[in-house]
Image (tube, helix red, strand yellow):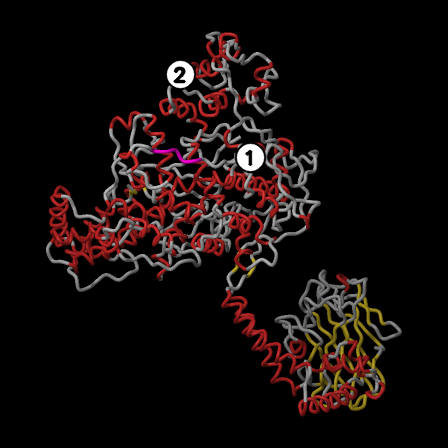
Amino acid sequence: MKTKPAAVLLAVLSALAAPLALAEDVEFNRDIRPILADNCFQCHGPDINQRKADLRLDEEAAAKEHGAVTAGKPADSELIRRVMSHDDEERMPPAGSGKARLSDKQIELLRKWIAAGANWQEHWSLRPPAAQPAPEIKSPEAQAKVINDVDRFLLHQLQLRGLDFSEPADRRTLIRRVYFDLIGIPPTPEQVEAFLNDKSENAFEKVVDQLLDSPHFGERMATYWLDLVRYADTNGIHGDNHREHWLYRDYVIRAFNDNLPFDQFTREQLAGDLLESPTRWQKIASGYNRLNMTTREGGAQAKEYQAKYAADRVRNASTVWMGATLGCAECHNHKFDPYTTRDFYQFAAFFADVQETAVGQQQPTRLPTDEQQQEIDRLNAELAELKQQFEQPAGELAQQLEASLANFETRWKSQSDWETRRPEEARAAMGSEVAVQDDGVIVLSKAKEKEQLVLKLCGEFKGVTGIRIECLTDKSLPAGGPGLAGNGNFVLSEIRVAAGEPQALGKATASHSQNQFPAEAATDGKAETGWAILPQVGKDQQIVAPLAKPVDASELEVTLEFNYGSQHLIGRLRVSTTTVPTPAAGDNGVPENIAKLLKIPAEERKPEQQSELLRWYRDKAPELKPLRDQIAAATAKRDQAVNAAPEVLIAMSGAPRETRILPRGNWLDDSGEIVLPQTPDFLPKAALDEKQADRQSRLDLANWLVDPNHPFTARVMVNRLWKIAFGHGIVRTLDDFGAQGRWPSQPALLDYLAVEFRDHGWDVKRTLRLIVTSYAYRQSSAVSPALRELDPFNDLYARQSRFRLDAELVRDNALAVSGLLVDKVGGPSAKPYQPAGYWSHLNFPRREYQPSTDEDQYRRGLYTYWCRTFLHPSLRSFDATTREECTVERPRSNTPLAALALLNDPTYVEAARVLAEQAVLEAKAPGKRLQYIYRHVLSRQPLPAEADALLPLAEAHQRQYEQDREAAEKLLATGIRPRNAELDTAELAAWTSIARVVLNLHETITRN
């Protein structure tokens, strides 16, 4: 079972919850369950295999039945006696369990709860969210700080504790805050000024609406969503090879921009391919099911990795939509929540129909855009018209084809006049055994590595124009022959013919020739070349050697040389001669079935026989060559258009794989019961699709997740939206709404938002607008000492939060303020500058990182090529996740690596230089230049102390660079964007240094 940071901190956080609760108020879910879950459930919880003393403390009846809890009598309750005991043999949690004694505060909470009647509650997250009326705020002074119901819920809780909201943030801070939260890039100076000058009452609401309508809103939301679903551009395991999946990222951006209802967003991702007549985007959405890590490692066990993929999907889907730790039940029943191992594998069975390669390259699907599909359809129509002309010639062309076929028949019949010649003598010069059968077939056996076969033909030869060697198959030969090599092949190096004197031969033809082993090589006089037939082994073949002039003789000697070695000899062959003027192989390439038709007189052929003959001849007829060429060109053009369509991994449903409960998660153990898809028993039941009543599908799972009675999905999503606006969720443990998760700091507000979200069409933009237009959102993030002492983690929301921007947004911010940011939305991943050699240990195969050299270099961080095992080092410095697993919340570290990245990563150096160029061009006065930089980077003027520090620094750096212009040139050469050559090198380098300092400020990368 995976240990979570939230679980490690739970005791601390639950203790801190006490000051936030009213003094007289002890509530089981908020105050008692966290204590029991963290300290007791592991041995006295849902997992029967781990349960000690047959005692359950997660269920009321079981706890009270055994006297562990005696309602109204703390002194008679074994629970109180054990947690207070100082005897290591008796105390709970036990000595050696790794858990500390309960604090006095925790024991007192347990005592008060039992004394008050030990009221038990079902876990709060298992009850469907219910509509919560907003509390009434009566004070006129307080009413002035109420904008919507969000404020009423929060202010009510603050007033109960004698607190109030903080003052509003200044308008510059507010507009920067909402820009970062909703689109992830800062406002321009012009946008800031427009907001400051807008004195209307709804000025802020207008900004919010503009941002929600911005195409960059989808990019901002996608940054968070892609962490959840572990999107990446590589497979993650073994060689971490490339995969085509960026269209899924485009789908997510598009869905958020179009405000696709979240219930439909859910259906399309889990089961887009199962929807009726799915659209292109719905198919792409189903690619969610293919985002898991995969392997191509040779020797990896398919069964093992199929089990890994199944477990990954359970962990991800249950976390993303349910905030559940169902993954902890893979090997045993969950120790803290009601999930069983059966629940885990039944949930996995929902995904068993997804067709995929267990070990090896996953096969993507081409999905043309609407424009590409229109072009493909147009090209297919042109191709169909050409094929119709070809298959149904009309008018003069039809007459020409008929005459051409008749002429071909005449020529074929004359050219098919071959006479088999049985050799009077056959000998193998190198020692292979030779036998000549009555039908003239020559059989070689006990073959030597190389051979020279000499055949003596006797009889009357008058006007002979060619020699034909038929190479015959037989089941006794390797691979059916006709060759004696292990693969059924042969290499005929030379054919020589003598009629007393050697006879000159023309260019040979054959029924089939292997690449680089053409038929003409058998008559070119070169012993080192030859004719071969791979891969057309197992089929009769023939070669025809035409004589340079007709021969009259009573005896012919035919010599066949096999010089290739490795027994590349012909195992069975037959020799024929002909007197036709231009002998050629294969009856001019006529297959056997067509040859039979040609032997039937035209007037005796049935209509279907004539049609079959015409179909074959159309591919040969010289009259149709122009049409054939047009069809070939049109086909190539169509194929080019098809191949230009992007590829993406999508879900395609097939026969479901068998799903078994794996004892202890052991993929080698097949003793477990076979299970079918089913949702956990203790949660509301899924409604079956009537068309698939015998087995629930991924679509049933999706519909179940967004059912109005589902307790998790709406809460989980609004909690994440709240995190975007406040830096942390109402439930701190965004991935755990179970017994080990944190009690919601504002349970009534959470349910209110969940119901609003669910009952108003699962509208993401509406819900975010409700949150960010509240007074609570607009507060200052400044914190007084008293408030820091009472509410250090800001669970009461008497102020806003300040936090560092996410890794991608740090990059976007620098590019935006310098004017380098390319605002193109969607498309393939880009490769920013990266240290040379960073991929040097990325093998199977070795790869060399090639940074983008066009506008892609300046695209948003969202589009950075996401290599799981070697994530871009700058992103890692700012805590971006590798996306090997679902990440609901990134850590926020504070290390020198971040400052070093801002100072030295070429992206930030180049951004600083471009920003400096603009400042230098904007004004000559150093003070004005500094103001320009501050306005663009921080949306404000520099403070006197800042100017006093930075202006002398600019002078010092300019003097330094005047002394070392080579260093200045090196600095200004960073990046692919050419520098402004008209600006003084030392001066520009000095102001580049100032811009680097400002880009490195804490304020620059912080959302206040």
Residue in the picture at 77% in, 87% down: 409
Residues 337 and 174: in front is 174
Residue 289 place in picture, x, y as percent: 56, 48
Rounded to the nearest whole Å, what is the CA distance between mark 2 and mark 1?
31 Å
Q: Quadrant of residue 335?
A: top right
Residue lying at 48% horizontally and 25% vertically, measured from the top left: 29
Residue type highlighted by circle 1: Leu
Q: Which mark is residue 308?
A: none
Above or below: residue 1 compared with residue 277: above
Residue 615 relative to residue 328: left or right: right
Query: To which quarter of the image does residue 194 belong?
Result: bottom left
**Label 1, on which residue?**
326
Query: In this rendering, does residue 544 appear at all?
Result: no
Range shown magenta:
133-137
Residue 81 picture location, percent across and down: 50, 9
Kindly identify which residue carries mark 2: 105
Residue at the image point whose x is 32% and y is 47% from the top:
180
Q: Nearer the viewer, residue 390 or 691?
A: 691
Q: How many marks?
A: 2
Q: Determine whether label 2 and label 1 are within 8 Å by CB.
A: no
Q: Residue 427, percent across and down? A: 80, 72
In-front residue for pair 816/841:
816
Please say whether residue 95 is one of the residues in the magenta stretch. Answer: no
Q: Nearer the viewer, residue 230 or 525?
A: 230
Dot 1 alpha-carbon crowd within 10 angstroms: few under 14, some 14 to 19, many 20 or more = many
Q: Amino acid at mark 2?
A: Lys
Against 644, is 303 above or below?
Answer: above
The reply to whether residue 741 is in sight is yes
Q: Secondary structure at mark 1?
A: helix
Q: Nearer the viewer, mark 2 or mark 1?
A: 2
Would residue 51 be found to the left or right of residue 487 on screen?
A: left
Instruction: Estimate how packed mark 2 is, as few (under 14), some (14 to 19) or many (20 or more) residues with alpha carbons within 10 Å.
Output: few
